[in-house]
Amino acid sequence: MNDTVLVLDCMNIFIRCYAANPKMSSHGYHVGGTVGFLKTLRGVCNKFSPTKIIAVWEGGGSSRRRSIYPGYKKGKKPKRMNRFYGDDIPDTEKNKNYQIATLISLLKNLPVCQVYVGDCECDDVIGYLCKYTLRDENKVIVSSDQDYYQLLNDKTKIYRLGKKEVVEAKDVLPLTGVSAENYCLAKCLVGDSSDNIEGIKGAGFKSVAKRFPFLASSEEATIMEVFNDASANIDKKIKLYREIVDNFDVVKRNWRLIYLDTSNLSANQMNQINYIVDTFEPSKNKITLMRELIKIGVQSLDVEALLLSMIYVK
């Protein structure tokens, strides 16, 4: 069996469970996000038999990105709340925070290394883990966030919960028209409406792949290669080339926002990530876990099955 590290995009997983799972505790509280997360964790552990689990939490957003572009994530729609109960939960934000805090506490009784680094985004931490801390290890990122396509390689895969499918580097080309190596570059042209990142007018993955066919190569291209190619073809009656040349500052800005590496992390933040991972000692506290679940009014979760799914974690 090959060693495999599960890297969990915690908020991505939690919000999905929170919005979809109607579970209520015996005390009358909505606990679908917490219970759904633990059941999801059991499922992915059974599927991939990990030897290490790293759960990454959001760090409150990135001040570095906001300094690059004040409009970053501005006007972003709030996380979708649970829709099962309507007015039965008067303060869904309070309930959500309660469930997250509860989940963090419960995970401390499992062999799950939880990583939280302030003033940065989960994406940055996962990018750093995959490229540096866990560079030589087989990794599966559990998330529906397509930004992670840029991290795919022979050591890194993504498991998309919604479609219950594994995405590998080779899958990105048929999905987007560009290779995994050039996905980030293409997205800098296309933009990202979910984060309020404006792209180049007329740029979509289909048009970018058509006008810049070298982005289908496994060789990583640069934004200057795109600029030079657009400049060389600017006299053609294709608006995209002119738009890129005239708005190249937008492309450069988007690269700084979208590229996952060390550029949006400080040395102290990188040291924190390494310290948390390097000093973590996995443990399984079955009795404490069961007591905490009973305390919050959850008695139906199969703790034995959850622990058994992590049998190879060391």
Image: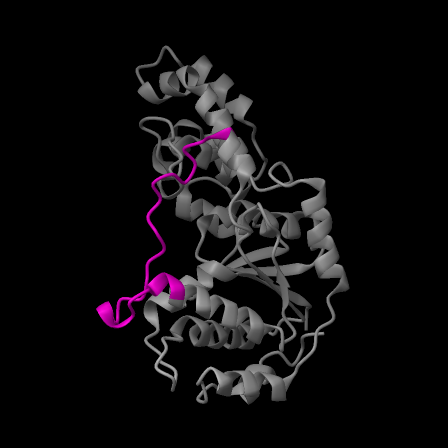
Quadrant in which the N terminus appears: bottom right
Residue in the foreground of this view, choosing between 230 and 202: 202
Does the rendering let one see residue 188? yes
Q: In this view, does 152 lie to the left or right of 280?
A: left
Q: How is the image coloured?
A: one colour
Q: In this view, does 1 lie to the left or right of 256?
A: right
Q: Is residue 252 above or below residue 269?
A: above
Q: In this view, does 232 lie above or below 112?
A: above
**Residue at coordinates 47% horizontally, 52% vertically from top-left?**
171
On the image, the x and y values in percent for residue 245 come to 43, 16
Residue in the foreground of this view, choosing between 107 and 131: 107
Does the rendering let one see residue 165? no
Quadrant in which the C terminus appears: bottom right
**Residue at coordinates 62% horizontally, 36% vertically from top-left?**
263
Residue lying at the far right of the rendered structure: 279
Residue lying at the far top of the rendered structure: 235
**Residue at coordinates 40% horizontally, 35% vertically from top-left?**
197
On the image, the x and y values in percent for residue 283 come to 70, 77
On the image, the x and y values in percent for residue 272 come to 70, 52
Queried whether the magenta region covers residue 89, the answer comes back as: yes
Q: Quadrant of residue 24?
A: bottom left
Residue in the foreground of this view, choosing between 234 and 79: 79
Residue in the foreground of this view, choosing between 260 and 291: 291
**Residue at coordinates 57% horizontally, 48% vertically from top-left?**
151
Q: What stretch is highlighted in magenta?
A: 68-94
Q: Quadrant of residue 246?
A: top left
On the image, the x and y values in percent for residue 40 come to 47, 73
Queried whether the magenta region covers residue 308, the answer comes back as: no
